[in-house]
Image: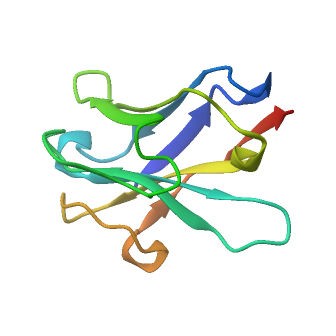
């Protein structure tokens, strides 16, 4: 079993930056593939970014490419999402997720473990 706890969400203005963190425990973090998803009110949960176990490969949704950066520190068992140039449409609850394969996945059903989410609100 893997426990994931997100932090770093908040209320910001358009153009600002935030960095989300996800602390993992319960499994060897360096063996897990990791991802970030988000869910806005009345919308389905959508993929944001993913990273392999090594951190050498990443994958982004078109809507965040060039603005968001996913990274991980395996020594600290922590996943990050650096979000720059935030837009009101980035407002959502952001979820950290993990799967056992170590690869890059972008579908919700491919992930085995989920955090409780952290709210990000971007005002115009």
* Identity of the residue drawn at 86% across and 33% down: 123
Residue at 69%, 46% (x, y): give it: 90
Residue 2: x %, y % from top left: 41, 52
Compared across the picture, whether 102 is left or right of 43 comes to left
Could you tell me residue 16's position as x and y percent? 68, 20
Q: Is residue 85 above or below residue 49?
A: above
Q: Residue 29, position in %: x, y?
A: 26, 41
In percent of width and height, residue 42 lies at: 85, 71
Looking at the image, residue 43 lies above or below residue 89: below
On-image quarter of the N terminus: bottom left
Q: How is the image coloured?
A: rainbow
Please give the count of numbered marks on the rendered protein.
Answer: 0
Closer to us: 48 or 14 = 14
Q: Is residue 20 left or right of residue 116?
A: left
Q: Residue at x 40, y 39 (%)?
A: 25
Which residue is depicted at the point 40% across and 69% down? 111
Residue at the extreme bottom: 109
Q: Quadrant of residue 56?
A: top left
Q: Quadrant of the C terminus?
A: top right
């Amino acid at each position: 079993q893997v426990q994931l706890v997100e932090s770093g969400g908040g209320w910001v203005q358009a153009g600002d930056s935030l960095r989300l963190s996800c602390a993992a425990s319960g499994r060897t973090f360096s063996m897990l593939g990791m991802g970030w998803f988000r869910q806005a009110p009345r919308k389905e949960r959508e993929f944001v970014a993913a990273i392999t176990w090594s951190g050498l490969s990443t994958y982004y949704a078109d809507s965040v490419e060039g603005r968001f950066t996913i990274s991980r520190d395996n020594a600290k068992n922590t996943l990050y999402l650096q979000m720059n140039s935030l837009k009101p449409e980035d407002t959502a609850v952001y979820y950290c997720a993990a799967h056992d394969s170590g690869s890059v996945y972008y579908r919700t059903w491919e992930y085995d473990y989920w955090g409780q989410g952290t709210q990000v609100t971007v005002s115009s």
